[in-house]
Every structure is written in structure tokens, then in C-alpha cells.
Amino acid sequence: MNINLKLIKLLILGILLLSITFGCNLPTRTESSENAASPSPMNLGEVKEVLGGVLAAGEAITVDIPGDPLDGMRIHAPENALTEPVEICISYQDVKSHSYGEHFEPITPLIDIDLQDITPDDFLEITVPLKVPDGYFALPFHLDPETNELEGLPVVGETADSLTFLSKRFSKFIFAMVREIALYEDIDTSFVFGKSNFKFPNQGSWFTPNGHCAGQSLANLYYHEKYKDKPLFVAYDGYDTAFFETPDLWQDDVMVYKLSSIVQSNVWFEGNPDVTYWANFEKRNPLRTYFTVAYLMLITGKPQLIILSAGEGGEGHAIIAYQKTGSTFYIYDPNIPKDGTRTVAFDLSSSSFQVYHSSLKSDGAPLAFSHYYYIPPKDLVHWELIGDLWSQVESGSLTSDPFPRFRINIVDRDSSFQKMPAITVEREYETNNAVVDVFVDQINSPGEVTIWQTASDYQTPTQIATKNIGETTYLNLNQGENFFGFNIRTKSDDGTLNWAGFKWIKITLSESDEQVEEEKPDTQANLSLEECDMTRYLTIEMDEAKNLKFQENSPCSHDCSAKIKITNDSSELVNIFYFQYAFARDTGLSWTGERWDGFGAAAPGDVKEYSVMRRYEASGECQWVNHGISKIGAIRSDQRCTWLADQYKNNFESSGIEWLEIASPCP
């Protein structure tokens, strides 16, 4: 009985293996392309299946059909490419004719590798048997299943009988060849310099301090692919902060500058096999890089991405080649976006690229780039991610915006020319005073604020001040509308300043005659105590107290410290106040006793911290310390609530505010 059961199991397993090995069992494979619903630029023959099997990580699978065009085709999966074995089916269709032009000569059938919708975690290595005639150049192409457009793939291995390429994205692909002589001719693309490119220079940012050349180039290529007829150069000028076009100022191109940095942060260079394989292969055959870029420009009519490196293992840069004259490529370098004369040249006599001089970013140290690589853009970043980011730009809001938020605060004066509480300005502000104070805060990193000014009829912005973040300066106003732009730059660890944001505001200086004042509705009536008291919207969190013991012979026993975190959970700007105490024995504190103090303005969601500390004595000689806070509250940051401060002179004990009592974590 047991023998029969084992025999039955073996028979079933054999049938399953046969079904996997000799048939993909996919109904769609029997359909001829002539009957397909969507039109194709290729007239294809019937589908022929040549392999069905299982591919596992660290293994390879090979087509073994003597006499077949794909006999010897091999697919290898690296160790980390697949989490579990996957079913694979390879089929092909002969190309009877096509409409890709005279320079597209198929050298293989249209090959379909089906991994059952599985996307490998790493690149698979595909070797295809073929012979390239002398005087010809061959390249593999992906056929986009939705658009039928061709996308080039980098070759990473070459023998007399085969070519090898890498891919993570599997659909239909084909090898095509062209006479090499055609690749020495002049080639143009749909990219027009000064229209199809971004206008801002790559200076990096708070998010990408070393530059975002690849992110800027990839975002540029995506836009051109989707909207090639739309001029990108002027499309997002000042978007979405300016009141008008600012062609002389790139710093306020906020949305697209952030977009470039975000794409850069998602680019895969480190450990990318496509980069490693291609870089190693290029060192032996730079002529293939030249031919690859030229052939793709010729066949697709599109600009192409080129990756540069400053020597072996050196730092990298990304540029876009959009035109070829002789053996010279005209390029868009994100570092010099308005220079249409930039080129990289290929020396035909030495079969090598000449050194190109640029840097990691426009204001970076000069570098000499000597290595050139072609890498498919979609192998460096998820193309859908760039599309989603562009959609967010179009909607006017980057939902995944990682950049720091900041506030522009105006300090105005009342009729007695006394300073009023700071008011955060989102977009517009109106005053009767010809001078107002201004400061920027809510940035945790040190840095600078550069202020630009222009008139209502728009003139080239003038830089009027540079201040540290949090530092106050003044603005002189002209009658009517005044426009001020605030460029925020944060300081990195090496001391360099990086773009972190930009915002325009409009300040209107209105007439101040008494008649106008009398006709104005009374909008400045004081709010009630209940309306001004925002304490109920505060959330208090206290870290666990930390105790640090002194040595046994010390007159002090131990230190206890903790942090109190206060969050403004309201939707309003508030001023947070607290009642603090500080008592000590001879420790040099600037003051002792009890008093009211405050953090100042806190925007919605802001978190303020206060450090509590107490030193306990073991003997009478200990210089003990005890400082902390016992009450916390908040008042709406509104001129109509200033009566509280005026009436109680910042001594709020009997103000009626519902203070939160704070128990010390160090009793």
C-alpha cells in the first residue's frame, strides 16, 4: 500500500514537471499579433514557445532547441534576485515588417519573457545568441506594451556569437542593428535647448546637499517624454509662490526645484548592477557607449541620459545629450542650464571620450569627468514615482514634501508706534506704517535668509538683505503694493549653505488719514478670555527622568533630568507661556526664584521643549540645583488678545487662564 502511494505521488510530480518544462499553458501565447486589439508598428508571425520552466535565485535556465534562432539563450538570476522560484515562459514571434524606419534592422525575433507578473529584486542577466555582421552595431530594445515605443538597454557582455544585457522589467524585447556609418552622421532629437529644459541651476538643496543632477535630468526627461510640445523652460517660473513671472530669479521655482531633489533621493546608483556592469564594460569599449547613445537618438528621436564619473570609482554627474554633430554631442548640463554651447566630444582616432569639465553642482569644486555611461532612466528610478510627483506639482501641492517649513513673521506698530505681537504672514499683509520688522523662524537648522524686493509692475528683483534665521530686520515700504521674496538656505555640516525654500509675500502700504480709519469697520474689538485662552489645545508629554549618580565621596548624590514636550494641537498660531522656578546653592545661575516666561509663537503642530533638572545633595556642601516649570498655558497670537498681556503685565497668575499644572519628574 505504501509502495503504491509513493508511486502515485511520483507519477503526479512527473506530470507536473512535464507540464512546466514543455508548456507555458498561457492561452494568450497562441494569439497572433495580427489579431491583437491594439495596433502595432510590427507585423508579426505566430507565437512560438521555446521554454517553460522554473527559475530560482542563483541559477540559470537555457533554451535547448537545436536549430532554433534562440537555441542557447540563457537567463541567469543572481542570488538576491528572487525570493522564491518563479515560473518562466519564453516565446517569440518573427518580424515580417515594421515601421520603425530604415535604421532599425531586426537581428532577432520579438522575444517575450514572461515571469507571471513577478518583478525581480535584482537585475537578471539575459544572453541572446546572435551574430552581428562586420560594419554593423546591435542593441537590445524593450518594446513598451502600452505605447509600442522602443527603449534601449545597455549591453554588458559581448562575444562573437552573443550579446548580454540586464533587466528587471520584462515584456517583449528585440535586438536591432544599424550600419555603423549611420552613427557618424549628424543626429537631431525633439529636445530644443532653451525650451525643453529646466532653467534653474543644480545647486543642491537641504535635502540633497551634494547636488541633484540626476534627479533634475530624469524629471526633465520624463516631462519631455509626456509633454514634448510644452515648453518646460518657462512653464513653472515662480511656481507656486510668485505673484507674477520672475524670469530673472530661479530661486523661487519652488515646486520643480523640490521635485528635482526628491527624484534625486530616489535614484539608485549605489550597488546598482546596471551601473556596475556597464561601468566595467565601458572601460573596455567606450565606442559602444558612443554608438549606444547615437543609435537611441537616431531610432527614438529623443534625448538620452548620460552618466559621467570622475575617474575610476570617482564622483558622478548626469547630463542629457540632445543633438549630435559629427562625433560631438550637444548636452544640457543641469549645472549650466542656460548655456546651449556645452558639448562632449568623442575622439574617433583613439575611440574614447574627451574629458568633460563640470562639477557635482553649479557652485561645487571643479571636476574632470573621464568615464561615460548610458543607463536606461527607468533602471535608475521608478518611472511611475516621477509621474506621481509631476501630478502633485500640477495640483499645486507636494504631498511628500520633505523640506523644512518656515514662517515669515511681521512685527508692526500701533498708533503709538509701540511694537505689536508678531503676526505670521502666509501671503498678504496690509499696514499703515512705512516700516515694519520681519523675521523668519521655525527652521531647526542654522542658516540664512536672503530677502529680495520688486515693485508691483515687476522689475528685476533686488537683493536687499541677508540675515541669519531668526534674526530681525526691517522693510521699507512704498505706497501701495510691495513684494518681498524670502530665500531660505540652511547650513550643512561642512558649513555650506543649501537651498531650503522660497516664498513671496505682498505687503500693502495703505493711506492712514483719519477719515479712512473712521470708515473702517471695527474689526479690532478684543476677544473674550475664553476665545483667547488656547491652553486646552496643548498636549504635554514628559520623557522618562534620567538619573546620573555622583561618586561616593561627592557632596552631591545624583542629578535628575527630563524633557517636557509641549505640542500646539490647535489650528491657530499661539503664544505659549509657563511659570518657571529656579533655586540653587551658589551655582552661578543668572537668576533664582519664580517668574512667568514663554516660548513665543508656536504654529499648528509645533513642539516646544523645556529641560527640567534637579541636583540632590548628599551633604551640606553640595551645590544643588532645582529648576523646572509648574504651569503651562497658551494665548491666541492675535492682536485682539494683547489685552491679556497689557492688563496683567505678563504676570498671569490671576488672569483666569486655565493653566495646566505640571508635576516635576524629579521630586
Image (tube, helix red, strand yellow):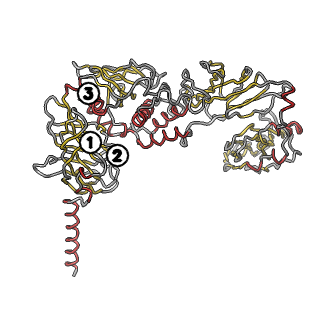
User: In the depicted view, which residue is nearer to us: 206 or 479?
Assistant: 479
How far from the left and from the top, in percent, is residue 185?
24, 23
Q: Judge left or right: residue 161 versus residue 647.
A: left
User: In the depicted view, which residue is nearer to us: 383 or 603?
Assistant: 383
How far from the left and from the top, in percent, is residue 460?
59, 18
Q: Is 145 placed above or below 335 here? A: below
Quarter occupied by residue 40 = top left
Q: Residue at x 24, y 50 (%)?
A: 33
Query: How far apart are the alpha carbons under marks 1 and 2?
Result: 12 Å
User: In the depicted view, which residue is nearer to us: 575 or 33?
Assistant: 33
| Mark earlier in primary sequence (1, 3) | 1
Q: Which disc, if any, is residue 146? A: 2
Q: Amino acid at mark 1?
A: Pro
How far from the left and from the top, in percent, is residue 539?
71, 49
As helix, strand or loop, the secondary structure at mark 3 comes to helix
As helix, strand or loop, the secondary structure at mark 2 comes to loop
User: In the depicted view, which residue is nearer to us: 562 or 25?
Assistant: 25
- Residue indicated by mark 1: 41
Report crowding for label 3: few under 14, some 14 to 19, many 20 or more residues within 10 A (C-alpha).
many
- Residue indicated by mark 3: 286
Q: Amino acid at mark 3?
A: Pro
| Mark earlier in primary sequence (1, 2) | 1
**Can residue 315 be seen here?**
no
How far from the left and from the top, in percent, is residue 18?
19, 63
Report crowding for label 1: few under 14, some 14 to 19, many 20 or more residues within 10 A (C-alpha).
few
Query: How far apart are the alpha carbons under marks 1 and 3?
Result: 32 Å
Q: Residue at x 69, y 31 (%)?
A: 428
Q: Judge left or right: residue 452 versus residue 178.
A: right
Report crowding for label 2: few under 14, some 14 to 19, many 20 or more residues within 10 A (C-alpha).
few
**Viewport quadrant of the N terminus:** bottom left
Mark 1 or 2: the one toward you = 1
